[in-house]
Image (cartoon, rainbow, N blue to C red):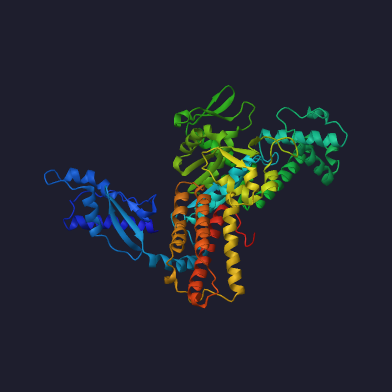
């Protein structure tokens, strides 16, 4: 990337100035290259000369002191003039400002087109294996709209890490074990019996028409029970309850997962692996261990002295490893606790499957679990820094300026599917990505429905559709970009568009390094704005024969802009329409 190359050149210029005696021989701090806020200060800038001053003042005690401005001048005197460097200026109190060369800029259009689908990619990961586990809503009902943010953040992080040179696996953790699934099964069983006009089996302890405590009461439970009847009839009434309950529960799980998969597919989210929690307790899934993953991990923790017994339960001593409180792993009734599955699952990720880095995307209600997860890593002999717990804040729906709390259809929670039906997957993804994960997210339904420049999704997608329209028109007119002379691209709006396109690799690097995908929609809007300004200022397809060569050059520029905008939208998981 240009930024890295500039940092190296400034460092080498500083070292050369020291070798030539122009600057005192001192330690050279890391060179930081930034983008100036004001365009008149160039494309890149560094305050490196100012940072050198503390080192110089310690090295030179008797000679007249150098000023930061003079240090900057002496560094610039030894700066290698790479082809992309145009103007280099020294500015008070000690900045070096660099402007890209116009001719070099124009010819980057071909470099963008040659990169194709790899444009914007950087090699930060160097093939490192990383797993991003996201979504993972309990399969006991439709996904709430709040889980949409989890899905969007996780998938976009995975896209960014792939573009940054990592090998990425997307995983959905299916919570198909534990009390919640039992409560889910009982709720379905009660509704199943009710729809068939029968009472629950006496041995179940359930009452007709009454959902048990901790059960699920939504309309969807009735709908799903009806689907089970349509598929299976009344056969669960003719078998013992201990067989009927798991049968109905598993059919309900199947329906829930079908709906989750469908909603994910609508949002252009496709998982590499769906991991079953039950498999952690089944020896058949870990034959190399000779026991279940859970039993193996419990043995390891006992050997390490990380477990103790109190009040009839088995506890994990998280406080001894930096956790804020100890956690139950096996309840007094002998059943594994929620945290037990977490430990076994992460042993499977790191030790059995060998991921070098794991990112878990969790809602803000899991913030308090972070210390115990880090303690768990230490107990397993793993570096806690290999596990990133990515916490995001909740989503608020707004309509007519008011918070939307209930579904218009069902009068209960607002399901993700309802919002997808309303504003579409592209708007859902774009809006839920637009703010940093640690900020509360307001999704304005009125704005998302607008087909105007005020709607950022429409504004960006319209830019891509407009480019496609220009290229179709050029083809109809028999105009092409063959043998284009890119040196003709000299208009400020043309060069500004190229400058903005060349920022994509930097945006990808920044967003990947900081796991901050919200940079993508902001960059997309800036890129679309640069194109719209270019389109306003520069006629692409001219009917004047004298403009034939300029038309070729601008058509090639437009092709590159289309590619850059499509790449950005793809990283967000948003479609790039050809027509609007």
Q: Which of 27 and 22 is in front in this view?
A: 22
Q: Examine the rendering and report whether any part of residue 345 can be seen.
A: yes
Q: Examine the rendering and report whether any part of residue 295 can be seen.
A: no
The residue at 61%/28% (across/down) is 331
Image check: 64 left or right of 153?
left
Q: Which of 27 and 505 is in front in this view?
A: 505
Q: Quadrant of residue 384?
A: top left
Image check: 15 left or right of 544?
left
Q: How many labels does the image show?
A: 0
Image check: 466 left or right of 505?
right
Q: Position of residue 25 (x, y in %)?
A: 18, 51
Instruction: Check the image and name the residue furthest to the left.
Output: 62
Quarter of the image that includes the C terminus: bottom right
Q: Position of residue 529 (x, y in %)?
A: 51, 55
Instruction: Check the image and name the residue furthest to the right.
Output: 197
Quarter of the image that includes the N terminus: bottom left
Q: In which quarter of the image is residue 289?
A: top right
Image check: 324 left or right of 41?
right
Identify whether 86 is placed above or below 171: below
Q: Which of 360 and 555 is in front in this view?
A: 555
Q: Which of 335 and 392 is in front in this view?
A: 392
Q: Where is residue 230 in the image (x, y as percent from the top left)?
A: 84, 45
The residue at 46%/67% (across/down) is 109
Q: In which quarter of the image is residue 124?
A: bottom left
Q: Where is residue 481 in the image (x, y as percent from the top left)?
A: 52, 73
């Amino acid at each position: 990337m240009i930024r890295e190359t500039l940092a190296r050149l400034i460092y080498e210029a500083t070292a050369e100035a020291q070798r030539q005696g122009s600057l005192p021989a001192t330690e050279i701090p890391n060179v930081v290259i930034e983008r100036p806020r004001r365009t008149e200060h160039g494309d890149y800038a560094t305050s490196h000369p100012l940072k050198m001053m503390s080192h110089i003042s310690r090295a030179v005690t008797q000679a007249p002191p150098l000023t930061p401005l003079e240090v900057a001048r002496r560094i610039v005197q030894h700066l290698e003039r790479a082809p992309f460097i145009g103007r280099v200026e020294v500015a008070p109190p000690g900045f070096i400002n660099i402007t890209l060369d116009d001719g070099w800029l124009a010819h980057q259009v071909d470099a963008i087109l040659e990169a194709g689908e790899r444009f914007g990619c950087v090699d930060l990961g160097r093939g490192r294996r990383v797993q991003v586990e996201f979504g993972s809503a309990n399969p006991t009902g439709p996904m709430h709209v709040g889980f949409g943010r989890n899905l969007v953040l996780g998938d976009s992080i995975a896209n960014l890490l792939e573009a940054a040179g990592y090998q990425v696996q997307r995983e959905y953790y299916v919570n198909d074990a534990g009390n919640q699934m039992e409560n889910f099964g009982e709720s379905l069983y009660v509704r199943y019996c009710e729809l068939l006009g029968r009472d629950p089996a006496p041995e179940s302890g359930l009452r007709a028409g009454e959902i048990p405590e901790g059960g699920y009461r939504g309309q969807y439970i009735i709908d799903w029970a009806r689907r089970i009847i349509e598929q299976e009839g009344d056969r669960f009434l003719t078998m013992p309850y201990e067989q009927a309950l798991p049968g109905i529960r598993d059919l309900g799980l199947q329906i829930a997962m079908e709906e989750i998969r469908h909603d994910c597919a609508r949002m252009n989210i496709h998982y590499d692996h769906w991991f079953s929690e039950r498999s952690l307790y089944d020896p058949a899934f870990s034959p190399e261990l000779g026991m279940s993953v859970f039993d193996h991990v419990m043995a390891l923790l006992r050997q390490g002295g990380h477990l103790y017994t109190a009040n009839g339960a088995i506890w994990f001593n998280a406080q001894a490893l930096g956790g804020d409180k100890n956690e139950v792993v096996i309840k007094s009734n002998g059943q594994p606790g929620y945290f037990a599955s977490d430990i076994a699952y992460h042993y499977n990720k790191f030790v059995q499957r060998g991921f070098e880095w794991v990112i878990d995307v969790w809602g803000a209600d899991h913030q308090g679990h972070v210390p115990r997860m880090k303690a768990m890593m230490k107990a397993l002999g793993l570096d806690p820094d290999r596990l990133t717990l990515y916490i995001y804040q909740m989503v608020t729906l707004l309509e007519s300026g008011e918070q939307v709390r209930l579904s218009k259809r069902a009068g209960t929670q607002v399901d993700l599917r309802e919002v997808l039906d309303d504003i579409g997957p592209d708007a859902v993804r774009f809006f839920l990505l637009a703010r940093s994960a640690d900020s509360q997210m307001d999704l304005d339904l009125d704005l998302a429905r607008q087909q105007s420049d005020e709607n950022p999704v429409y504004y960006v997608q319209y830019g891509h559709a407009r480019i496609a329209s220009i290229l179709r028109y050029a083809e109809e007119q028999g105009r092409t970009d063959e043998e284009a002379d890119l040196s003709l691209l000299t208009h400020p709006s043309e060069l500004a568009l190229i400058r903005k396109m060349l920022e994509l690799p930097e945006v990808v690097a920044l967003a990947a390094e900081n796991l901050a995908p919200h940079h993508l929609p902001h960059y997309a809007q800036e890129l679309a704005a640069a194109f719209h300004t270019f389109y306003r200022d520069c006629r692409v397809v001219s009917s004047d024969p004298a403009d034939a060569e300029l038309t070729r050059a601008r058509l090639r520029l437009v092709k590159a802009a289309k590619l850059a905008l499509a790449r950005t939208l793809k990283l967000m998981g948003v479609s790039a329409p050809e027509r609007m």
